[in-house]
Structures are given as C-alpha cells and as structure tokens.
Amino acid sequence: MLILSRSEGDVIHIGDDVRLVVLSCDRKSVRLGIDAPRDVRILRGEIVVDIEQENQRAMTAQAQKEWLQLAPMNTLRSNIVEAADAAKG
C-alpha cells in the first residue's frame, strides 16, 4: 500500500486515465474528487462489503432452493403427513 500525504488541491494520477483530487480536508474527513473514464468502476469500501454480504446471502438462499428441488415433492408431503400423524398419536 502506498501512503501519501496530500493537501487541498493536490492531484494524484493513477495510470493514464484516473485522477484523484483532494478537494478538502478537516479533522474528521477528506473529500476526494475522482476523474475517471465511465468504464472504470469506482465503489466505496462499505459498498463492496455490502455487495459481498448480499452475494453470500443469495448463494445460501440458492443452495436452499436447490435442496428443495432435489427432494421429490411426494417425499416432502409424506414426511409432513407422517409427522402430523405422529403428533396426533
């Protein structure tokens, strides 16, 4: 990781197409301006974490759905009926 100290108005070039401009600084935050081509995807770190967590939840839900598809409905119904009969008796 490259660590730099910059002041307001300073520019950092990344590759040939991306410019990072320090717009303002205070004790709590730094405002950055990013000038990049439209095809360069720029995401805040917390958004990346949210996307990864949502993808994980979706994969888990898909796995559960696939499991239900693997179990024949007749088997599921008979298990439910057997459990209901056992509870009655």
Image (cartoon, rainbow, N blue to C red):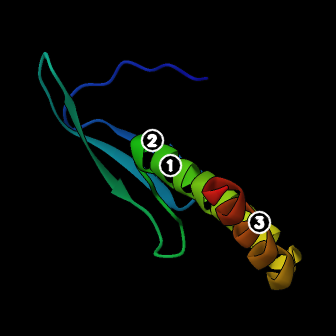
Task: Assess whether mark 1 and mark 3 are in contact (beta carbons under 8 angstroms).
Answer: no
x then y, percent, for residue 74? 84, 84
| Circle on res. 45 | 2
Q: Quadrant of the N terminus?
A: top right
Q: Quadrant of residue 83?
A: bottom right
How far apart are labels 2 and 3 at the CA level? 50 Å
How far apart are labels 1 and 2 at the CA level? 5 Å
Task: Give the amino acid type for the residue marked by disc 3 in the picture.
Answer: Glu
Task: Give the amino acid type for the residue marked by disc 1 in the picture.
Answer: Val
Instruction: Name the residue nearer the viewer: 76 or 9.
Output: 76
Q: Secondary structure at mark 3?
A: helix
Label 2 or label 3, whichever comes before in sequence order: 2
Task: Assess whether mark 2 and mark 1 are in contact (beta carbons under 8 angstroms).
Answer: yes
| Circle on res. 48 | 1
Q: How many marks?
A: 3
Residue at horizontal 41 percent and vertical 42 percent from the top: 46
Instruction: Name the residue nearer the viewer: 16 or 50.
Output: 50
Task: Give the amino acid type for the residue marked by disc 2 in the picture.
Answer: Gly
Residue 46 sits above or below residue 35 on the image:
above
